[in-house]
Amino acid sequence: MGARHEERRRQIAEALLAIIDRHGLDAVSLRDVAAEAEVSLGAVQHYFRSKDEMLLFALDYISERGTERIQRNLGQGERPPRAIVRDILAELVPADDQRRAELRIATAFTARSLVSPNLADHLRTGYAALHDVLALLIRHAQDAGEMPAALDPERTAATLFALAEGLGTHVLIGHRDPQGALAILDEHLDRLAATAR
């Protein structure tokens, strides 16, 4: 797949995300995405054979953007495993307009997955991958003395993931502000660190 091909797919994905953010998933049509991306309907159909294929690509695209932000943070020198865990979890809390839009879109996908087995399967795969990364980092944090050795990494990863995702939803609907949500996340991580000492 050439760079031009990938660039056009991303252009279409950005258009799709803009429509979903403004109007929700039900408003998405290939024709509207083509108009938003300022390309022909045929161009959209060339890159995506169906609406579902386009939606799955857009979901992966959102995930990639978050991963790129985390990797940029990782590129800032050696960082302890606990700090990396915090970076990953903080991506689930919308602290700026881009993350807020991404979470609104991800929430729309989650709601759609309740009636779309293919989308639900795709989300489960993504959730499992993120869970595995968190569990691995927690093991590294335990080895480094940053988290208690007695913790079950799998259960701790599940708890932290659920906490961050729930806080993100609370921010999205205005129940909490981003700083307050991140403070709760940090307080929980600090308690884990304190019990390791």
Image: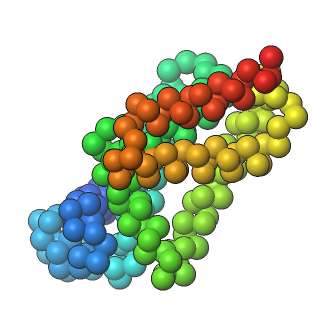
Residue 66 visible somewhere in the drawing: no
Seen from the viewer's position, the closer of residues 113 and 179 is 179
**Is the residue 176 above or below the residue 59 in the image?**
above
Q: Quadrant of residue 178?
A: top left
**Is the residue 57 above or below the residue 189 in the image?**
below
Image point 88% across, 34% down: which residue? 150
**Residue 37 rendering spot, x and y as whole percentages:** 17, 64
**Residue 138 rendering spot, x and y as whole percentages:** 73, 36
Residue extending furthest toward the right = 150
**Residue 109 rendering spot, x and y as whole percentages:** 42, 68
Quadrant where the C terminus sits is: top right
Q: Quadrant of residue 20?
A: bottom left
Relative to 128, 91 lies left or right: left
Quadrant where the N terminus sits is: bottom left
**Residue 133 rendering spot, x and y as whole percentages:** 66, 45
Residue 183 visible somewhere in the drawing: yes
